[in-house]
Amino acid sequence: MGDALISIIPDMKRRTVQAFVDKAQSLDRPLLEKRLKPLSLVHVAKDENGNAIVTEREDIERMPDKLLRKGDRVCMDFGDHYVGHVTLKLDSAGSPQDAPAFLRLKFAEIPGELLDDSSTYEGWISKGWIQEEFIHIDALPCELKLPRRYAFRYVEVLAIDTSAKFQVVVQDAELTAVSAVSLEDAEPIQNLPEDLQRIDRASLKTLQDCMQHVFEDGPKRDRRLWIGDLRLQAKANYATFRNMDLVKRCMYLFAGLIRDDGKIGACLFTEPVMQVDDTFLFDYSLFFISILYDYYQETKDLDIVKELWPTAFRQIELALDDMEDGVPKTENPMMAFIDWKDGLDRQAAAHAVWIYCLRQGEVLAGLAGDEKGENQVHSLLSDAIEKAVSCFWDEEKGFFVSGESRQISWSSQAWMVLADVWDREKSRTLMLHLLEENPEVGVSTPYAYHHVIEALLHVGEKDKALELLRTYWGGMIKLGADTFWEAFDPEDPNASPYGSSQVNSFCHAWSCTPAWLFREYFSTM
């Protein structure tokens, strides 16, 4: 599932707008810390359907009684998904320790990761993301403070080898969980049915664990600030935790760490130095406009609109370089992201994102008092809407089509509806037609599923939107999800955009949006 998205530009020139970076740094806050102990010991195996499940539990008080010889293991369950740092207290039993203890520590977000064999990994992104450590302990007892930060629920300690004379004992374990927010800061929705309450709670936990010093895309992987994720995280945050400083910090970072021509990157690195990555996507750069627009709608902060509008307008100017005859170019199939769906032609959906962001840009230009820019955006918007119909609408099929193949995809329809190319009633007809015809090129990530569901809600089809939400996010809950995943195919839960689910993120920012959708559209259920 998915095309490899790797961008390497060795000679790319970066520019830092120090005033914006300084403002971002002034908004950084210490993370909240919470100390936690494991709740139980577990055993994991596959059920009759091949899904990894917890098959047995033991009292955590029994952990020091487990004497780990070569090949023995003990697995701790912390009871929920967390992000943080772990300390283990280790000891030995038996005769004096006459050799180093050789241990493997494995951290798992879901039970299935405990059964994965990393030696079989053949995906196209780094194996370094797999959360396991191989450690030699020369002298026991010891307190082992692991330097890395992990995202997990389960921790397994495997004795790869000891010696015939001694055994390893895990006396105790402690986690210092970290986040920018507390789960108690978000009020649950009253009167939600039980299944939706579970979805809402997992959505909130997903968002909480991705809120660190920036809005991360995933605390296991990539631990980066991606702008497509940020747009959805910010909307969910406004409805729940309302940490406005973190959104503001991320906007300043994107505005301050740019390509030399002013282009905003798809993602930023914050360690070891702050810098923009060399990945640029048509839709993601434009989403800076959308994030600024949404922030203003929530805060009415006109000062930041005036401050960042020139950066936002620059994304419109630079987007024109990726267009030909008024529509996005098609030479590079991954010029825009849209979704990881195999074979997806992204041109029509990218054009709809262009319209969506131009509408918001026109409002921002007016707020910023940029009359010339407002007129330019208005002209581009009028042309873009006309091109959406003349280049992409197929009256006979009743769908927007994309690319030379005139592909019909779910994403193309959803984004054209969100862009308001048609009026509400015609858009509603389109979405109902989409559900009825069910074209083959569907969606493969919570990110794209969100936009389909939001499009249904945009045209008033709440029941059908809720049915899809229950099926998709509820499908992850049925598989035991504490937080929502980066990619999920109900027909193939082990599917991965990367060639192996071992590097999939099982707590991923773009899947947190049910928490927003419930509060925006279903708070009166």
Image: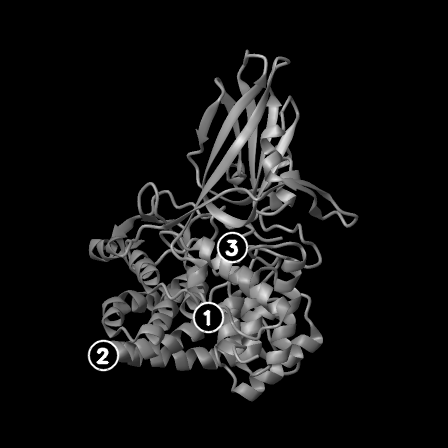
Name the amino acid type tagged 2. Gly
Residue 417 location in percent, x, y?
53, 78
Question: Going from the N terminus, do you reach mark 3 or mark 1 first?
Answer: 1
Q: Is residue 363 left or right of residue 515?
A: left
Name the amino acid type tagged 3. His
Q: Is residue 445 above or below residue 220?
A: below
Name the amino acid type tagged 1. Val
Mark nearer the viewer, 2 or 3: 3
Which residue is depicted at the point 25% across and 54% down?
A: 21
Secondary structure category for the residue under label 1 = helix
Give me the disc on residue 353: 1
Q: Which residue is mark 3?
A: 508
CA gap, disc 2 to disc 1? 24 Å
Which residue is farthest left? Answer: 19
Secondary structure category for the residue under label 2 = loop
Displayed quadrant of residue 471: bottom right
Question: Going from the N terminus, do you reach mark 2 or mark 3 first?
Answer: 2
Q: Is residue 324 left or right of residue 14?
A: right
Which residue is depicted at the point 57% across and 62% down?
A: 446
Displayed quadrant of residue 489: bottom right
Q: Which residue is mark 2?
A: 369
Q: Is residue 310 above or below residue 104?
A: below
Closer-to-camera residue (525/147): 525
Q: Is residue 37 above or below residue 201?
A: above
Q: Is residue 408 above or below residue 212?
A: below
